[in-house]
Image (cartoon, coloured by chain):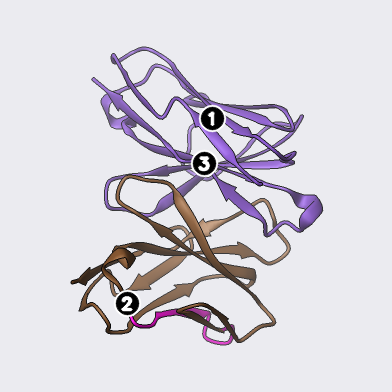
Chain colours: A brown, B purple
Amino acid sequence: SQQGEEDPQALSIQEGENATMNCSYKTSINNLQWYRQNSGRGLVHLILIRSNEREKHSGRLRVTLDTSKKSSSLLITASRAADTASYFCATHPAYNFNKFYFGSGTKLNVKP
Amino acid sequence: GAVVSQHPSRVICKSGTSVKIECRSLDFQATTMFWYRQFPKKSLMLMATSNEGSKATYEQGVEKDKFLINHASLTLSTLTVTSAHPEDSSFYICSASTSGRGYNEQFFGPGTRLTVL
């Protein structure tokens, strides 16, 4: 991808389990955002974490950011079948708001 | 608030024709709009960034003459795929940013699926 990779590429879990997705990026960033995309549809913004933040929570979502390793993780707790979707991280490179790059994405399947 | 629309949502055209896709910010002024392309089961690839009233900035490898971008107003940007070919078939997504609220505010359109026969 233009900016980085996500792993795993695909993740299949049972309802109720936690899902963890990782994102790595290449350049220094201003912020990192996580998005969700249902098959063939548009993007839904989940959470934004700035470069000076290390962890953020939003409902069942927990995002961490390690700028020294250029990586982030998204944790979805107590997953539901409705969480089945593709998840992407995206970054604004530092000092360049005219760029916004997506990671390769993780396809999450939550089995009921 | 912060709604972005795209039109059309789906288009099928013959090879050699040109297709125009519109991206509108419905309830805010977008100083910057981004155009992405997404292949099946793949991530979004940034094609170009457009600022109102100036020429678009294209990513490396994206043909300017093939993908014409116009950002005529603070609420409208258009992407024209010229002389479309089957390999141009893809899902095209735009997003709009309000730099006045901080350039990290990105609002995405629902996407346009282009099929070139």
- Cα–Cα gap, marks 1 and 3: 22 Å
* Amino acid type for the residue under numbered disc 2: Ser
Q: Which residue is mark 3?
A: B109
Q: Residue at x 21, y 78 (%)?
A: A13
- Cα–Cα gap, marks 1 and 2: 43 Å
Magenta extent: A66-79
Task: Evaluate whether label 3 is on the same chain as label 2.
Answer: no
State the residue in front, B84 or A57. Answer: A57
In the rendered image, residue B102, in percent from the top left (x then y), is placed at 76, 58
Between discs 1 and 3, the one toward the N terminus: 1
State the residue in front, A60 or A39. Answer: A60
Does the magenta run of residues contain A28? no
Local crowd size for mark 3, using a 10 Å CA cut-off: few (<14), some (14–19), many (≥20): many
> Dots 3 and 2: beta carbons under 8 Å?
no
Q: Which residue is mark 1?
A: B64
| SS at mark 3 in the image | loop
Q: Which residue is mark 2?
A: A79
* Amino acid type for the residue under numbered disc 3: Gly
Q: Is residue A90 above or below residue B7?
A: below
> Dots 1 and 2: beta carbons under 8 Å?
no
